Amino acid sequence: MRELTYREAIREALREEMKRDPKVFLMGEEIAEYGGSYKVTLGLVDEFGHERVRNTPLAEASIAGAALGAALVGMRPVAEIMYIDFSFIAADQIINQIAKLRYMTGGMVKVPVVIRTQGGGGVAAGPHHSQSLEAIYAHIPGLFVVMPSNAYDAKGLLKSSIREDNPVMFIEHKKLYGEACEVPEEEYLIPLGKGEIKRPGKDITVVAYSRCVLRALNAAQDLAKEGIELEVVDPRTLKPLDEDIILSSVQKTGKAMVVYEACRTGGFGAEIAAIISEKAFDYLDAPIKRVAALDSPVPFNPKMEDYVLPNEDNIKAAARELMGK
Amino acid sequence: MPEMDAAKLKEIYATMVRIRFFEERAITEYRKGLPGFIHPSIGQEAIPAGVCAFLREDDYIITTHRGHGDIIAKGARLDRMMAELFAKETGYCRGKGGSMHIADVERNILGATGIVGDGIPIAAGVGLGCKMQNLDRVVVAFFGDGATNSGAFHEGVGLAAIWSLPVLFVCENNQFQQSTPMRDYTRLTDLADRAKAYGIPGITVDGNDAIAVAEVARESIEKCRKGEGPILVVGNTYRTVGHHMGDPGTSYRSKEEVEEWKKKDPIDRLRRQLLENKIATEAEIEEIHNATLRELDEAVKFAQESPEPKVEEALEDIYA
Ligand SMILES: Cc1ncc(C[n+]2csc(CCOP(=O)(O)OP(=O)(O)O)c2C)c(N)n1
């Protein structure tokens, strides 16, 4: 089967949905000729024109607000916020309007808005371009939060997000854009709210999403040589969360670890850990391990950045501890 | 020639050369493998050099992601800047900030931001603090043209206006918001017209003419100091390199356009003026260049030889 990078898979999802539905359009900063900061939308303006691939002024609140407005009258906007760090400027519109309008109107309106953005560290971009902020959006009732870990998932999930009548925060990871995997030519969708086991294993359930899935898979490979079998569970969407896939894995392994790139305190992995302890406590034979970033801004110096962000070694150490080794 | 003394003009020239050579050297070092992003301001040097020429040491500046020039013009040390680009312990931010976050509080350089527009309301606040404490100081907020689209610009300028704060808003208009040309993000052809919305003066100046910039800055800074601020100054210029090191700068503008602007290079222009008007000799100009190159050799050596920060320092300066 052909391989696509995460970047290409996202672009293909956008292209297919734009072809399928003339109401779908893109707006964001530098997304037309420039192709976006990470070149995800490169070439789409040639195919669909500026009417549907709209460069916006540098004004994130209006990107989000205008996406909502267009959605209210029948369009299906995919709005890009270049870095999730800048989404704070749009956050009022996202949190107070986009997330709540359907509810506040007693269900009168639909809000088919996708906010595409990207986060995460790993490129020495410093404290304003490296954050992982998914927990903030997952905290808000009404928002879907999607965080794909590979090209295949990114494509199928983005297509579903665009067809969803409720708002979706679609959060990509800048270090995944160049990662490739098999993506079929035929159309497929991945339902929001369904996780996937990325690697089966009997010893420890490792719940990871976005780039941390890769870290967990790498660690699992190494640990297998030591006789420790990780089961890597990727929820793929944080909201709604596929609790069943997590809980049934924990029931099988009896040990759980959550891995996330955001700061440890209040990260979404803490929520996953809480769910596991609420609903699968009786199956656990060790405390749940949390592997996350240190509670620090993401520093510029690459070695410091590596120190702050979670890595394979942290996962391996936590796994060995869980196994009493 | 306007009545600006020869020493001042040479100082402005030297500042521009420092900025240009610093960034050229940073680009060379970056290509050899520095981390992160840098956003060079090559072609835009006349604006920071002209504006900062008439700031006092105790005046403040705040700048942006494309801030090397502003920071150098306000007097920052090239070695500590270079060390920051190298992510070293001796860098201005001890390796935690990088190119987009350099500050030098001793020189009242209050920092740079990666969030476009954020410096503008902060500058209003600095102006407020100065005014409330009768400090008789002026603050300059440097930002790009794209930043004038942000809510932060409109809110920050609006606030400074109603409270008559001593803030000089300086827009370094390189005519692109990253890749988006002005005509695609505003109906205005003169960004200084934005000032009208807030009832403050808006002045347009040829941002490649260092002397013109300096004249406007001198007058505007004086006014701000007398309580007649805020003022918006828009310098029209052009960045002749890409948006950052990863951008060849070719997808949104023609080669011809870039070449046209290279011919209007602000450094060449001031050099010609200095020579034609016998303000400086070739030998003096050459000495300015050579001195800067020597300083940069030292700066790079300093950066290379400086230690990396200890990784545990990542957790320092976090109090909650
Ligand atoms: C709030 C915010 N939105 C978007 C960006 C991404 N970005 C960085 S620079 C830039 C263009 C800014 O244009 P301008 O203010 O004209 O400055 P220039 O880069 O041209 O110097 C953009 C869109 C950002 N850093 N911050």
Image (cartoon, coloured by chain):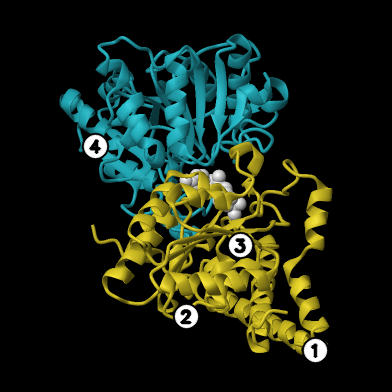
Chain colours: A cyan, B yellow
Query: Badge 4: how crowded within 10 Å, few (<14), some, or many (20+)?
Result: many
Compared to residue A291, the image places residue A253 above or below, namely above
Query: What is the spatial separation of the Cα atoms under label 4 and label 1, in whole angstroms?
Result: 74 Å
Task: Name the mark nearer the viewer: 3 or 4.
Answer: 3
Q: Using the image as rendered, state which of residue B313 and residue A18 is in the foreground.
A: A18
Across and down, in percent, residue B6 comes to: 68, 88
Circle 1: residue type? Thr
Label at residue B34: 3
The residue that label 4 is drawn on is A288
Query: What is the spatial separation of the Cα atoms under label 1 and label 2, in whole angstroms?
Result: 28 Å
Query: What is the spatial separation of the Cα atoms under label 3 and label 2, in whole angstroms?
Result: 33 Å
The residue that label 1 is drawn on is B281
The residue that label 2 is drawn on is B56
Q: Chain of mark 2?
A: B
* Residue at the image point whose x is 44% and y is 52% from the top: B199
Across and down, in percent, residue B257 comes to: 80, 50
Q: Chain of mark 1?
A: B
* Residue at the image point whose x is 50% and y is 58% from the top: B201
Query: What is the spatial separation of the Cα atoms under label 3 and label 1, in whole angstroms?
Result: 37 Å
